[in-house]
Amino acid sequence: MRSPTAADLPSVWQHEASVPAACWGRGPTPAPVDLAIVGGGLTAAWLAYHASRRAAGRWAIAAFSDGPLAHGASGRNAGFVLGGTSELYATLVGQVGRPAARELLALSQQNRQFVRTVLRAAGHGAEYRETGSLYLGAPDEGETLAHTVQWLTEDGVPAESLPLSRVPARLQSLGLPHAAFFPEDGAVQPVQLAATLVRQSEGAGVSWYAGARVDGWAVQEGVGVRLSVGGDHVWAKRVVLCTNAWLGQLVPALADVVRPTRGQVLATGPVSLDYAYPVYADHGYLYWRPRPNGTLVLGGRRDLDPDAEATDTLALNPRIQAALTALASRLAGGPVTVAHRWAGIMGFTPDRRPVVGAVAPGVWVAGGFSGHGVAMTGAVGDLVARHLLDGAPLPRSLDPGRFYAPA
Ligand SMILES: Cc1cc2nc3c(=O)[nH]c(=O)nc-3n(C[C@H](O)[C@H](O)[C@H](O)COP(=O)(O)OP(=O)(O)OC[C@H]3O[C@@H](n4cnc5c(N)ncnc54)[C@H](O)[C@@H]3O)c2cc1C
């Protein structure tokens, strides 16, 4: 398999949809803004959406992305809209305690509500369906999955343990003996979702710039934050850095906290499956979803080559892609055609929770979604918008200061 460049590795979602934005440098440099958003993915788009609505024309807001919009993880994921963080709920409870875990769980539920509302208002579905999701646990995940089901149920979120005999026949022999079903989960076409958010925020006054790389920032007390953008500069009263896997380039203290981690994905031609919900499996190392058009999107298995996948270089991993192809055939019950192969770069934190909070006066970060941002960014964008505009508190369990002491 040849080594592709980013330009020839578009995801199936990017093939089907695009997110237009004004090109940086083609017009005048923006005047000072009340809020500058750095990033071109779902975090930036959701923040732009929520902040522009909440500000209702009182703030000038601009968003800057180094590449085309939805070019990072947001355009390259599997589109699962799951609950909680990327850890099973029982693991999350073990990390942060029950009250903080409930707070994060509530965020993911609110996220689904936002996805629903935005897509309804846009008059199209972006393929969003709340089909529920199946989790297939590895042999050592039985206890965690059982606690997850029990504690979610106690906390008011539907969840059900399933005997393996009740999962689709082809899934019973994968060596993943524990199963649970989460009826509220779903999946979306992520690029269509991002495009919808960008359009709606533009309609509310946000200026979006593509090809606008932010090379650095400096706080000048009493004046604001000076952003270096594509050889020029822009002043902002406040800045939110939503650059996910690349946060460490703009905040060196986060370089060892949010680690770029590559994921491999493929999309098949038509296959015949007797279920319509996304499946997440084996410690989250494997995931697939049948699409309404009868094809299958399948990704994961970075555990087969973890050192090679600890990178921000966008390239296919032949070994992992071969394993995914073999699995796709097994799931389909026969040979499959692979229509698209791609990779994407996630930002993983050590505890798999995002970092959301201030890193300097007037500068905030929101990123490190650890492979789970489609499920969280809508609610995180709302939290940050409410924090900036109304002074609402941010969750302590997401504070970047849990990893280092902000200056
Ligand atoms: C293969 C794969 C599968 C996934 N599957 C799922 C899933 O099924 N469900 C789920 O919930 N999550 C999933 N995720 C994770 C999810 O995609 C991310 O958590 C989410 O998209 C993060 O959004 P973001 O906007 O923070 O980051 P990104 O989408 O990565 O956006 C970061 C943006 O910052 C821009 N940028 C970087 N540096 C600069 C700079 N200096 N100046 C200006 N712009 C800059 C980049 O161009 C990019 O647009 C998956 C991710 C991958 C890669």
Image (cartoon, rainbow, N blue to C red):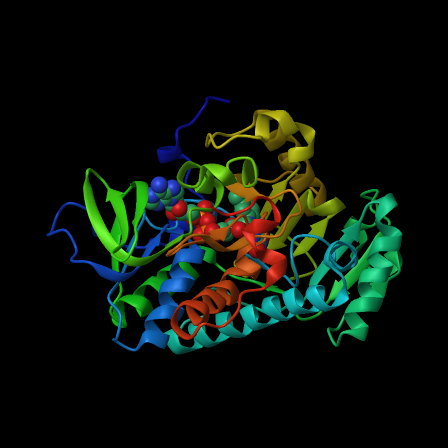
Q: In this rendering, is residue 106 above or below 278?
A: below
**Along the line of sight, which residue is nearer the eye, 253 or 50?**
253
Q: Which one is nearer the viewer's eye here, 59 or 164? A: 59
Is residue 290 among what the camera can see? yes
Measured as percent of width and height from the top left, residue 83 is found at 65, 63
Q: Residue at x 30, y 65 (%)?
A: 199
Q: Residue at x 65, y 69 (%)?
A: 103
Residue 156's image quarter? bottom right
Q: Is residue 289 above or below residue 253?
A: below
Tell me what residue is drawn at x 55 percent, y 46 percent.
405
Left or right: 262 with respect to 206? Answer: right
Q: How many marks?
A: 0
- Dividing the picture into quadrants, the one containing residue 63 is bottom left
Please state if 136 lies on the left or on the right of 77 as rendered: right
| Residue located 78% across and 52% down the image | 136
Against 183, is 278 above or below?
above
In percent of width and height, residue 70 lies at 39, 50
Q: Residue furthest left?
A: 28
Residue 203 in percent (x, y) is at 26, 71
Residue furthest to the top: 2
Residue nearer the viewer, 246 or 276: 246
Relative placement, left or right, of 62 versus 361 is left
Nearest the eye: 158 or 277: 158
Furthest toward the front, the residue is: 222
Q: Position of residue 138 (x, y in %)?
A: 82, 45
Quick check: can you spot residue 344?
no
